[in-house]
Image (tube, grey):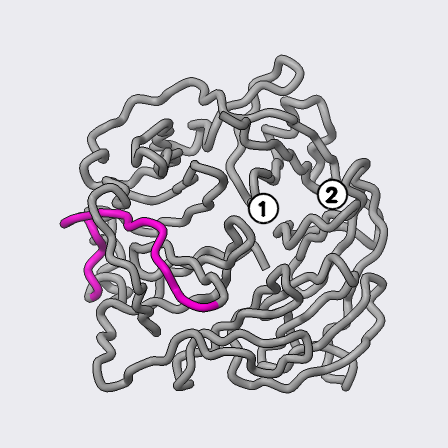
Amino acid sequence: MKTSVLALSFLLCFSCTKKLDEETCLPLKESIEVDSKVENIDIFEDVSVIPLETTDESLLSDCQIVAFCDDKIIVRDINTLYFFNIETGRYESRICRQGNGPEEYVSLNDVCIDCADKLVYVLERRGNIKTYNYNGSFLKEYTNDSVVSIEMLESSRFVAYSGVNRQCDITLYNKDWNVVKKIWKRNKEVMNYRDIVEVRDFDVFNGYPCFMDTDTLCQINNENVNPLFYIDKGELALPFEIFTDKKKKKERDSYIWGDYGFLSEDFYFLRFYYDNKIYYDVWDVSSMKLMYRNIVSSPVDARGISILIDGKKINIWPSYVRGDMICSVLQGEEVEKLGLPTDNDENPVIVTCRIRKR
C-alpha cells in the first residue's frame, strides 16, 4: 500500500550494509536558510486530469491511492477499496468485506495488489492475509500473525516487515506465503531504542521496495538492504526524548520533524515541518542539490508545486509514485481552478504526470 508515511517511530532499527559518503548525503540542515520560492520547476510532462466518479456506492470520505493497475486506479477509503477506470475515472467496483466472518477482514492494516493476476492481498489487523479478486470475492486466506506491512515484488514474491516482537524483521515470501529468505534479523543485545524506526509501509523504486530507516532511505534488492542516500539534519534532527514525550510537542518546532518523501527518477519529493512552517522540497539526488522549495507559513499559502493545466496554475504534491509517474489528489480550491464541481459530496480529482526524461 502506497499511502502511509514511511513512519518515524521508535520500534525498530535496520542496518544498511553499504557505507554512505558525502556524495550520497542530502544536506538538508545546510539548506534550511534557503527560503526563496521558485515559481515553477519544469520536470513534468504528460499531465492528465481524472475526476473520480461520484455514485451512491463510491462516495469517498478519504482517498488514498493504492495502485495503478492496467486500466484501473485503486484507492482506499479507510476499510474499503474502490476501483475506477484510469482513463475516465468511472467507478467500476469495490471491496467492502469488513467484519468478523471467515471471508471478511477486521480492518485494512495494509494492502498490496497483484496486477498481473488481478488479485488483492489484504493484511488484517490481527496478521492474517486474505486474498480477493477485483469484484470482492474471497479466494484464500494465509495465516501469518507476525507480519505488519507487505509489498509485492515483480517476481510474484512478497516482502514483509514482521514487527518488533519477532526475531526476523524483513522476510521474502513466495506467492503462497512460504519463507524464501530472511533478509535481516534483529540483534536484541545491541538494539538502541533511541535510533529505531518501524516500517509501516514500503515504497517501490526501480522495481525494488524501499523504506526510511531513521534518516537513511534504504532499498531491498532481494538479497540485501542497501542505502540509497542519507538526509543530513545535523543538530536539527528531532531528539528522541522530545519525539516520545507528548508534553514536549511544542518543542518540535525547533527541529525538523514529520518528514516524508517520495523518490521518482532522480528526484526526491520531501515534505517536512520546521519553525512552524511546512517545507515542500524537490531535490536532485544525482547531484544532491535543492531544485525547488515552497515554504508554507499560513493557511492561505499555496502548497506543493505549481504546474500549468490548460493555462491554469494548479498546485500538486505527490500522493503516490510508481516509476516516473507522479499522482496527486486534488480537492477544494485546486479542483475549482480546473472548473470542476467542488461540492463536499463530490469525489476528488486525480492528477497524473511523468518525470521528463533528461
Q: Considering the image in quadrants, where does the N terminus appear? A: bottom right
Q: Residue at x 22, y 75 (%)?
A: 192
Front in this rendered view, residue 328 or 224: 224
Q: Is residue 351 above or below residue 144?
A: above
Front in this rendered view, residue 309 or 186: 186
Residue 290 x %, y %: 32, 31
Residue 303 x %, y %: 46, 32
Residue 160 x %, y %: 52, 72
Mark 2 or 1: the one toward you: 1
Residue 279 x %, y %: 35, 37
Secondary element type, mark 2: loop
Secondary element type, mark 1: strand
Q: Are marks 2 and 1 in contact (CB under 8 Å)?
A: no
Where residue 322 is drawn, which disc sits there? 1
Furthest residue to the front? 223
234 is within the stretch colored magenta: yes
Where residue 121 is drawn, which disc sits there? none
Magenta segment boundaries in residue numbering: 223-240
Q: Is residue 273 above or below residue 42?
A: below
| Picture quadrant where residue 112 is located | bottom right
Q: Which residue is mark 2?
A: 345
Q: Earlier in the sequence, mark 2 or mark 1?
A: 1
Res. 328 visible in picture: no
Give amino acid for label 2. Asp
Res. 115 visible in picture: yes
- Circle 1: is it few (<14), some (14-19), or many (20+) Cα within 10 Å? many
| Picture quadrant where residue 36 is located | top left
Give amino acid for label 1. Arg
Q: Residue at x 59, y 28 (%)?
A: 334
- Per the model, the C-alpha gap separating discs 2 and 1 is 29 Å
333 is within the stretch colored magenta: no
